[in-house]
Image (tube, rainbow, N blue to C red):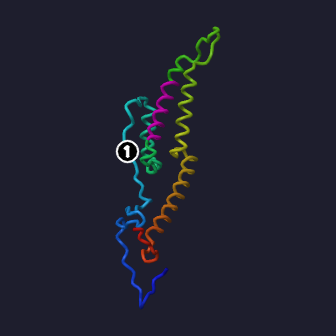
Amino acid sequence: MPRPVDGTRQSRPKKAFGTAVDQRNGTQMRNFLNASVVEYFKPTEEVTTETAKKAWEAYWQDQQACLLTPSSKHMLERWVAALDRYEKFIAEADGQPTVIGSTGQPIANALYKIAYQALATAERLERQLGMGPLNAASLGLAAMQERQGMEEINKAINDIDDDDIDFEDPR
């Protein structure tokens, strides 16, 4: 039931940003747009190949690094580990491309299969992390749409006027 208003209605001033509290549960409202971003960190010591180390440094100099969040940090670590594993196994397999099979015939070295599985993992993670022009374009569009969605949510949260909503105290 709306309460009757006599004379001019004066609403309360809005609280300073970041101090508003949700009346439903008493938690502080948060701005969804300001998601924390992961800062540069070194790869693990297991990463030893020069190619993987260069790829790591190149990632951090690229624009996609600004989209990395704490929840996707492990994906970056798995990506560089898979790239490192690929480089190690492909170098070892290239040293002896064929081996003798169980019946005495020459067959391709089994390390190639392991190397290409690591490469497939790295490529899948590159798509997730937005590496490469096509992946970056699709990730950029998704990030831009997410940012627009978050801006709408934040605007809606900040535009809520306490006087427009009648809350009943459940006590």
Which region shows up in magenta?
Answer: 74-90
Residue in the image at 46% along x and 38% along y: 55
Where is mark 1, residue-wise?
A: 40
Q: Examine the image and state in which quarter residue 166 appears.
A: bottom left
* In the foreground, 56 or 20: 20
Which residue is pictured at 49% across the width and 61% down the height?
150
User: Where 80 sits versus 3, above or below?
Assistant: above
Residue most extreme to the front: 171
Residue 28, quarter of picture: bottom left
The residue nearer to you, when weighing 75 against 86, is 75
Residue 169 vertical placement versus 137 (above, below): below
Residue closest to the eye, 96 or 161: 161
Kind of residue sitting beneath label 1: Tyr
Decide: is 52 above or below 156: above
Above or below: residue 169 compared with residue 129: below
Name the spot of residue 4 as percent of width and height, x first.
45, 86
Position of residue 112 measured from the top left corner of the image (x, y, whole percent):
57, 23
User: Label 1 crowding class (10 Å Cα cut-off): few <14, some 14-19, many 20+?
Assistant: few
Which element type, helix, strand or loop, lies under badge 1? Answer: loop
Q: Residue at coordinates 42% horizontally, 68% vertically from top-left?
A: 170
Q: Is residue 80 rendered magenta in the image?
A: yes
Q: Position of residue 21 (x, y in %)?
A: 38, 66
Dividing the image into 4 quarters, which one contains the C terminus?
bottom left
Of the pair 159 and 102, the residue shown nearer to us:
159
